[in-house]
Image: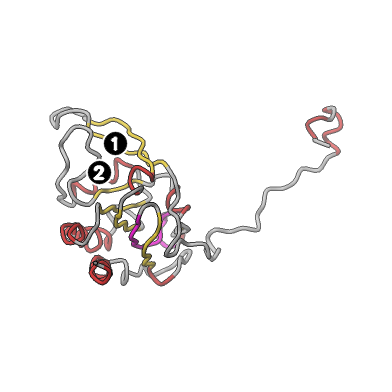
Amino acid sequence: VSRWALPRENLRNIPLRPLRSDFDLASASLTMSATDGSTVPSVTFKTRTRIGPPEDENPFDWKDVTSEDLFKGKRVVLFSLPGAFTPTCSSFQLPGYEAAYEQMKALGIDDVYCLSVNDAFVMRQWGLKQGMAEDMTFGANGFTKVKLLPDGACLFTRGMGMSTLWEKERGFGERSWRYSCVINDMKVEKMFIEGGKVIQEHGPDPYEVSDEKTMLSYLQSVKK
């Protein structure tokens, strides 16, 4: 019988079920990370699109962009990292993919995306700080080469099974584990996960297989 169907005076006799406390994300071992052949999650990214000239104080408005908009019927490279403005991401990973953008396009890639659990404002400022060329055309969604994809609510990251906590180590809270992948028509063609798996509250931040050189080697190996 539903407790809500009982008279109010009887509710005090029904024990309330406590919230679950047996699942601790910080110590959990995520075993459902995306693998080759997995379908990527269908989510909505909250992005900013250009609606005015550069001299305007705020020439942008909100635009919802879905996974299908980005990946359906396309073959793209996506790499994900713990945070904008962080050292390895800023010094090596993003600059490396930006420099390799044209090579990847020549190897059959439609576009290259950099994803982080940050909002659209932070991602744009990071790109500008990196010296990336901004797409100034009306309706544009970012930069001319690598596109910076804000996963501020961590929806795509969770759906990929790549969510991790660095609360104790770095005060980050929930972020993305570092990885790269090729997405072909909404499915993972190839996945490169640092360390081979997601680790919670991990001290080191490995950067060995999600770099642009590993990705270029793979794309060259499968080019027809």
Q: Position of residue 48 (x, y in %)?
A: 29, 36
Residue 165 at least partly seen: no
Q: Quadrant of the rendered structure where residue 177 is?
A: bottom left
State the residue in front, 40 or 56. 40
Q: Residue at x 19, y 49 (%)?
A: 129
Q: Residue at x 15, y 29 (%)?
A: 53
Q: Are marks 2 and 1 in contact (CB under 8 Å)?
A: yes
Which range is magenta? Answer: 169-184
Q: Position of residue 59 (x, y in %)?
A: 21, 30
Query: Is 101 included in the stretch rendered in magenta?
Result: no
Classify 157 as above or below 13.
Answer: below
Q: Residue at x 44, y 64 (%)?
A: 35
Q: Which residue is mark 1?
A: 48
Classify 213 as above or below 140.
Answer: below
Q: Quadrant of the rendered structure where residue 109 is?
A: bottom left
Q: Which residue is mark 2?
A: 124
